[in-house]
Amino acid sequence: GAVVSQHPSWVICKSGTSVKIECRSLDFQATTMFWYRQFPKQSLMLMATSNEGSKATYEQGVEKDKFLINHASLTLSTLTVTSAHPEDSSFYICSAPRGGVGWDEQFFGPGTRLTVL
Amino acid sequence: AQTVTQSQPEMSVQEAETVTLSCTYDTSENNYYLFWYKQPPSRQMILVIRQEAYKQQNATENRFSVNFQKAAKSFSLKISDSQLGDTAMYFCAFNMGGSNYKLTFGKGTLLTVNP
């Protein structure tokens, strides 16, 4: 199946610093990518939809200025957590659908564990 | 807005036995798509099975099958001959299709397969 990678797989940072997480589709082009946040033993919460060549669409309650998303190419989307605080510590997952049909399988990255000290 | 409900936070089953995970959803749409995803301890999300709402035939994938009841808005997952590797969180998910790839997930069911 198709592969989506994330980098880094885990990161520890100090409070107040910014952290960038990359999501890449390795063998297909993705005009749309999704970013999720997952707390322990909970479901995936959609944060935003990343659109190549245009602004991201954020879900209600997600701070746009805190979670910056850039979809620089058809294979790369980045999520930058700005001025990170301990409450931003979480597991971040990206996904990308392949193909032009709405139900095409979405491929998920392996996730990035962020710990803010 | 669409909602997905999984009423079983945790379940357990003995190896080689059969288990059914429940999922109900709410939508006013007529055409949509339903999915079961598996998240093992590695936390990598894996598609288990999917169903198109306009298809009456229930989807099957090897040991995994669904019972799709459109009128009841129910979409349960049956795992036959359970294996230790089936231990994982299982999420039911919904999307409206077309150009809208956005998935709505249920809260998940933690399935433990015991030896």
Image: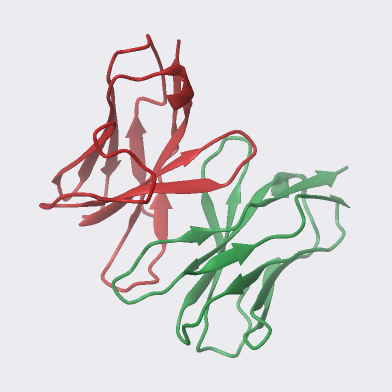
Is A75 left or right of B71, judged from the image as shown? left
Is B5 left or right of A69, judged from the image as shown? right
What shade has chain A been given?
red
Quarter where residue B50 is shown:
bottom right
Percent position (x, y) of residue B64? 68, 67
Q: Is residue B61 visible?
A: no
The residue lying furthest to the front in this view is: A61
Q: Which of A71 and B112 is in front in this view?
A: A71
Q: Nearer the viewer, residue B64 or A11?
A: A11
Identify which residue is drawn at 10% across, 52% down: A53
Percent position (x, y) of residue B112? 79, 45
Q: In this view, does A57 lie above or below B77?
A: above
Identify which residue is drawn at 60% across, 78% down: B59
Is A58 left or right of B102, judged from the image as shown? left
Q: Is residue A52 visible?
A: yes
Q: Nearer the viewer, residue B34 or B9?
A: B9
Percent position (x, y) of residue B98? 32, 77
The residue lying furthest to the left in this view is: A53
Identify which residue is drawn at 40% across, 18% down: A85
Q: Is residue B19 above or below residue A107?
A: below
Percent position (x, y) of residue B31? 45, 84
Is B46 left or right of A99, judged from the image as shown? right
Identify which residue is drawn at 68% across, 67% down: B23
Q: How many numbered marks appear?
A: 0
The type of colouring in the image is by chain
Quadrant where the C terminus of chain B is found in the figure = top right
Q: Please give the letter of the chain rendered in green.
A: B
